[in-house]
Image (cartoon, rainbow, N blue to C red):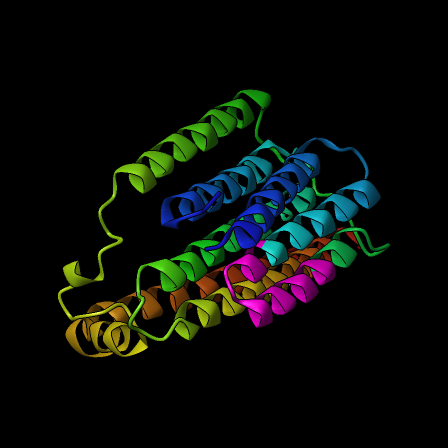
Amino acid sequence: MDSLHAIGFYVSAAISVGGGLAVAFLPGRGSRGAALAVAGVGVAGIYLSLYAGFTGLVALVCYAGCALLLASPQYRVMEMVVGGAYRQAGAVAAGGLFVVLAYAAWRGNFAHPTLFYLGAVNSASVGRLLFAHDALATEAVGVLILVALVGAAAAWRVRERGR
Amino acid sequence: MSAGLVAVLFVAVALVAVGAFIAVWKRDLTAGLAGLPLMFGGAGVAFAGASRFAAPGGPPAFGQGVAALLAVAALALVALGVGIAGRGTSR
């Protein structure tokens, strides 16, 4: 990565993370939606600096859609039923998640594609891994997700009819 | 100045952590939905960075395709959540 793309990457990273923090702390749906759009601009800039311009365009459109949805008049407030102690514990857990993942990114040796036992990391090798070598596990995960979604939808419908 | 895979992964981790923080910190569940695009965006940045740096001989379009798919999935999930929230409180 040359210097121009590296500068663009770091600036975009600062914009995206700063926009995300603004989403967390700004009051009001309009300001939160604007902050999410700013974060989307940052994420699109990261993709652009990684030579993924089309993905950046898709991300920009999707983040703009998310921002419009969260700032739209159809927005309705749903209060969380858990107490403040659980929210604080969750915030600490998010910090712990950051520490663990950052340590894994720093110490991980997965950047060497020769360590992947099916060869280079590309669509063919990942496809062989998911649909040939670990096909049963992939189907099990798919069935689990499907059952969870159907169960959630059924529970929601039963609750709606009960009102 | 340069940026490698570790720098990309650090940014991806920061985005995931900020998204998780938003999801658990917001008292309003609908506002907590704003953490989903950030978490998915962090995963997408990790995919795009891995395909850019870790697979010099392979096609980088795989990670980019997964990142685009994650962005669309985040938009769909936010639309679903806002729709469910609006339907649940309008009665």
Q: Residue B63's spot in the image, x, y percent?
A: 41, 67
Q: Is residue A103 left or right of residue B74?
A: left
Q: Quadrant of residue A49?
A: bottom right
Please say if B24 is above or below A136.
Answer: above
Camera-nearest residue between A3 and B85: A3
Q: Residue at x 17, y 70 (%)?
A: A119
Q: Quadrant of residue A158?
A: bottom right
Camera-nearest residue between A134 and B27: A134
Asked whether residue A82 is drawn in magenta, I would say no
Q: Residue at x 81, y 41 (%)?
A: A31
Q: Quadrant of residue B60?
A: bottom left
Q: Is residue B48 left or right of residue A124?
A: right
Q: Is residue A50 left or right of residue A105?
A: right
* Dominant secondary structure of the residues highlighted in magenta in the image: helix
Q: Residue furthest left?
A: A117
Please say if A91 is above or below B5.
Answer: above
Start-end of magenta stretch: A46-65
Tell me the quarter of the image containing the C terminus of chain B.
Answer: bottom right
Q: Residue furthest right?
A: A73
